[in-house]
C-alpha cells in the first residue's frame, strides 16, 4: 500500500525529547487501586490493553506501584522482543520495569501516534540491541531516550494515526468475531460429545495405534520412508517443513503408514496444554509416510465411524482437556493406548454423524473466513507500518 508520504518535511528527533515518563507512585492496596497490569496481560499482536489483574489476587508483586490512567501508553522494558506495549482505557498500576508514557505534542509528537511508534520494527530492533542483562534483558530508560526517528508534522501524524486506529478497531472486531465463531464450533462439538459416561469405549469405534519407536538401528535399511513425529503436529495442522526418515519394513509400513483422513494425536508432552494436540493427515506428502511413537493414530472404522467424525472427536477431546485427563505421569504426561482406549464417547449412526459433520464444517468455514480476514488486516497493518517507520 502506498500512502504517498512526502518525508522531506519530516523532522529527525530523539525519542526522549518528545515523550514523558510518568513516575507517580502509590501504595495500591492502601489507596484502593482496583487494577494492575503485568506483562502477561499485554498481547503482542494488539495496540490496546484490555486485560488486568486484581491487586487482591495475591499475584501482584511489591514493585507494582507506578500509576497509569486512561490514554497512556505502557511499554514493558524487559525482553522487548516480546512486543509488550499498548494503550489503556482504565486506571491502575504497573511494576517498575513497565514505563508509563505520554507524548509531548508541543515538541512534535501526538499521543495517538505514540503506541504505533513503540511497536514499530525499527524501535523494537533498537530496543533489543540496546537491552542489557542476560537472563532478563531490559531496555533502560537512558538508551530508550536516545532512539532517533523521523517524525512527520502533527497534521500528518493525525492522518496516519487515524488510518492505523481504524485498522486496529476493525482488527479488534475481527478478533471478537473469531472468538464467537470458535465458541460456536466448540458448542457444536460439546453438544455431540459431552456427557459420555454411558457411551462406548473409544477403541470400539476408532482404530487407535501408537507409532513405531525411533532407534539407531532404523536409521539405515532398504526401506527408508518419511515419518511424522509430535513436532509435525501443530494447531494449524500437519507441518511438513521438517520431516525425518527411517527404515520401515514392508510389514511395518502396512501397520504404520498413514492415509488421508487419519488423525494424529500428540501422545505425550512435558507441557500440559500440548498433550493430545490433534491434526488430520490429508496426504501432505507423496509416497509412504509413517509415524513415530510420540503420536497416536486415530482411524475411522468402516461402517461405524466417518473420518471427519474422528477428527471432530479428537478436536473436542483436546480442547476440553479430556486427552489430558486420560494421561498419566509426573514430568511428562503420556496418554498411551491404554488412556486413549479407556475414554468413552457417544457414537451416533452414520446419518447423524453426517449431519453433525455438516454443522461443524459450516462453523469451521466461518472460522477460516474470519481468520483470513484477520491475516489480511495484519498484512495491511504491517505494510503501512513499514512505509511509515521502515523495517520489515
Image: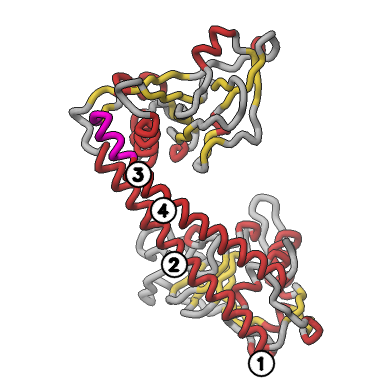
| The C terminus sits in image quarter | bottom right
**Residue marked by disc 4:** 366
Q: Residue at x 73, y 79 (%)?
A: 4
Q: Residue 282 location, x and y as percent?
A: 51, 32
Q: Residue at x 54, y 35 (%)?
A: 238
Q: Earlier in the sequence, mark 3 or mark 2?
A: 2
User: Can residue 129 be found in the magenta stretch?
Assistant: no
Indicate left or right for 370 with 118 as reference. Answer: left
Report which quarter residue 388 is drawn in: bottom right
Q: Earlier in the sequence, mark 4 or mark 3?
A: 3
Q: Residue 269 location, x and y as percent?
A: 49, 32
Indicate left or right for 195 with 35 as reference. Answer: left
**Residue marked by disc 1:** 106
Q: Earlier in the sequence, mark 4 or mark 2?
A: 2
In the picture, the disc for residue 360 is: 3
**Residue marked by disc 2:** 173
Q: Residue 7 location, x and y as percent?
A: 78, 81
Please tell me whether mark 3 or mark 2 is closer to you in this view: 3
Amino acid at each position: 500500500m502506498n500512502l504517498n508520504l512526502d518525508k522531506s518535511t519530516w523532522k529527525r528527533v530523539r525519542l526522549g525529547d518528545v515523550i514523558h515518563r510518568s513516575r507517580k507512585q502509590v501504595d495500591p492496596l492502601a489507596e484502593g487501586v482496583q487494577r494492575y497490569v503485568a506483562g502477561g496481560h499485554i498481547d503482542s499482536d494488539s495496540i490496546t490493553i484490555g486485560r488486568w489483574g486484581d491487586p487482591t489476587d495475591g499475584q501482584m508483586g511489591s514493585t507494582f506501584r507506578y500509576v497509569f490512567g486512561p490514554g497512556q501508553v505502557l511499554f514493558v522494558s524487559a525482553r522487548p522482543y516480546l512486543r509488550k506495549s499498548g494503550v489503556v482505557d482504565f486506571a491502575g498500576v504497573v511494576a517498575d520495569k513497565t514505563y508509563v508514557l505520554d507524548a509531548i505534542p508541543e515538541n512534535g509528537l501526538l499521543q495517538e501516534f505514540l503506541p504505533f511508534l513503540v511497536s514499530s520494527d525499527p524501535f523494537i530492533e533498537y530496543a533489543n540491541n540496546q537491552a542489557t542483562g542476560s537472563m532478563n534483558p531490559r531496555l533502560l530508560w537512558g538508551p530508550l531516550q536516545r532512539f532517533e526517528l523521523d517524525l512527520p508534522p502533527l497534521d500528518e501524524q493525525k492522518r496516519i494515526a487515524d488510518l492505523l486506529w481504524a485498522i486496529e478497531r476493525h482488527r479488534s472486531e475481527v478478533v471478537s468475531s473469531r472468538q464467537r465463531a470458535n465458541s460456536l464450533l466448540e458448542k457444536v462439538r460439546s453438544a455431540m460429545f459431552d456427557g459420555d459416561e454411558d457411551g462406548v469405549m473409544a477403541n470400539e469405534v476408532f482404530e487407535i495405534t501408537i507409532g513405531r519407536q525411533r532407534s539407531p538401528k532404523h536409521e539405515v535399511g532398504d526401506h527408508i520412508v518419511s515419518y511424522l513425529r509430535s513436532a509435525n503436529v501443530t494447531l494449524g495442522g500437519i507441518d511438513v517443513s521438517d520431516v525425518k526418515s527411517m527404515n520401515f519394513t514392508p510389514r511395518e509400513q502396512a501397520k504404520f503408514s498413514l492415509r488421508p483422513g487419519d488423525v494424529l494425536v500428540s501422545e505425550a508432552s512435558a507441557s500440559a496444554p500440548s498433550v493430545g494436540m490433534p491434526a488430520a493427515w490429508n496426504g501432505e506428502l507423496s509416497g509412504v509416510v509413517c509415524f513415530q511413537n510420540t503420536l497416536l493414530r486415530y482411524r475411522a472404522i468402516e461402517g461405524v465411524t466417518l473420518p471427519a467424525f474422528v477428527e471432530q472427536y479428537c478436536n473436542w477431546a483436546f480442547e476440553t482437556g479430556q486427552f489430558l485427563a486420560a494421561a498419566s505421569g509426573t514430568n511428562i504426561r503420556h496418554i498411551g493406548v491404554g488412556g486413549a482406549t479407556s475414554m468413552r464417547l457417544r457414537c451416533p449412526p452414520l446419518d447423524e454423524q453426517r449431519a453433525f459433520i455438516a454443522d461443524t464444517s459450516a462453523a469451521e468455514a466461518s472460522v477460516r473466513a474470519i481468520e483470513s480476514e484477520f491475516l489480511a488486516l495484519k498484512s495491511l497493518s504491517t505494510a503501512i507500518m513499514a512505509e511509515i517507520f521502515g523495517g520489515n
